[in-house]
Image (cartoon, rainbow, N blue to C red):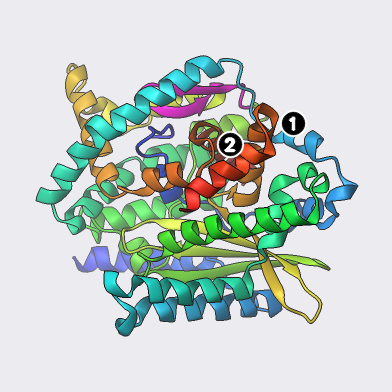
Amino acid sequence: MSTLTCGTETEYIEGRMALAQTEVADQNEVVDAFDDDLDEFDDEFEEEVRTIADPIEPFNRAMFHFNDKLYFWLLKPAARGYGFIVPEKGRVGVRRFFSNITTPIRFANALLQFKFKYAGTELSRFLINTTVGVAGFMDPARDRWNIYKQREDFGQTLGHYGAGPGFFITWPFLGPSSIRGTIGYVGDLFLDPTTYLFPNERLATVGVEAYERVNSTSLEIGVYEDMKRDAIDPYTFIRDAYHQHREKLVEE
Amino acid sequence: MQRIGRMTLIIIALTTLFSQSLADASEPTDQLKATIDEVVTILRDPSLEGAEMADQRRARLRKKMKERFTFAEMAKRSLGKHWREMNSDEREEFTTIFARLIENSYIGKIEGYTDEKVLYEKEMLRKRTAIVKTKIITKQGTDIPLDYRLINRKGGEWMVYDVVIEGVSLVRNYRTQFSKALRSSSYEDLVEKLKSKIE
């Protein structure tokens, strides 16, 4: 679930970033860059460095268009109808359930990066939420004990060990990604319990994924629309936001 | 059940050892927090609730934002090197339009936030700039990291010049979009496009 569709771009807004381990030094570098007056540093250069390569832009734009239509014509109406039947509390519960069963992805990737503290956090959350939180439908770890989800995935693990993002890819259905993000996504599928739920029924597995997507979309209706309204060029907006967001996650 | 309870207690005891204590608040955090508290008060004010009070509510929110946000700084940093090539009239025009866009976007987003909790996690302070890291704990079960970048004004006021949501800097994101727009067409076209966004 590390890759996103156009409908749930904001799924990453829902995710959370690590808080504790951000080095103050790293942050100071960021401040430093802004501390200087604009005249004193070469903007063009900075922009060049921080932008993700996009050699297949025409393909990406076509896929962006496809995902955009997919959202407005299919995903959004489905999510609306579903949201009309299932109360919000229930949908939040379902989202939490899916988040809880994908703990192995976050736990394993924290371990792979030797982030034992984050791995511990994920383990505690899983134990608490699976028991007290009734199979993960509730999140007492967060709501009662302020233990927050750690967002780790295989794409971040690859980045942690020095792999660059490669270039930008927009997948149909899955949304914005990169070479690294795509390899990470496939890697995480092996740790995702829903992959093994119906070993001989690929269609059922896709069904579960689709249901999860509809459920999370139903909680995010309006976010994609707002983004499109605020952006000068929605495609560039998404590409840059994806890149900034991923680099930030890798940094932590 | 008692066993589960005891186990949970142990886990909690262990994890609280790891949990981070709140950073000691100082000037930038205090000032930002004061503004956010006032914004939340407006959002929760029952006399300003509902669609019929929207204009009044938004006017109040806009006023609060103007006190804490420096739109000129935002516009300047969003345009980067293009800012240097603009005359003062253009800069003023651009800042006004850009401010409106940011206000609308920000207000549209926070209007739904009434029960959300804001955690002030950390502050990083330099001579003229500071970063205040916050986290929005939403009632829909998600946590949104939201960082404010502030710049110190004469007189000691700390003003927000960038908002970073989930690692995505508003200024940087607009800069990428603006520079692309200015490469492929004119400044006039960009202004037209922005104007159409705020109408």
Is residue A169 shown in magenta?
yes
Q: Is residue A194 visible?
A: yes
Give the x, y percent position of residue B152.
77, 71
Image location of residue A183, percent across then percent down = 50, 22
Tell me if A57 is positioned left or right of A89 in this view: right
Q: Nearer the viewer, residue A38 or B194?
A: B194
Residue lying furthest left in this view?
A85
Give the residue number, with chain letter if any, for mark 2.
A240
- Identified by mark 2, the residue type is Asp
Extreme residue in the right direction = A40
User: Horizontal and vertical percent for residue A157?
Assistant: 56, 34
Q: Quadrant of residue B102?
A: bottom right
Q: Position of residue B24 (x, y in %)?
A: 65, 77
Q: Secondary structure at mark 2?
A: helix
Q: Residue at x 82, y 57 (%)?
A: A35
* Nearer to the camera, A226 or A96: A226
Q: Chain of mark 2?
A: A
| Visible residue check, residue A27 | no
Q: Secondary structure at mark 1?
A: helix
Instruction: Reply yes or no: does residue A197 show up in magenta.
Output: no
Q: Where the N terminus of chain A falls, by quadrant?
A: top left
Mark 1 residue type: Glu
Which residue is labeled 1 in the image?
A: A48
Instruction: Decide which of A221, A233 is in the foreground and name it.
Output: A233
The region drawn magenta spans A165-179
Residue B138, quarter of picture = bottom left
Left or right of A30, for residue B66:
left
Task: Give the number of the disc on residue B108.
Answer: none
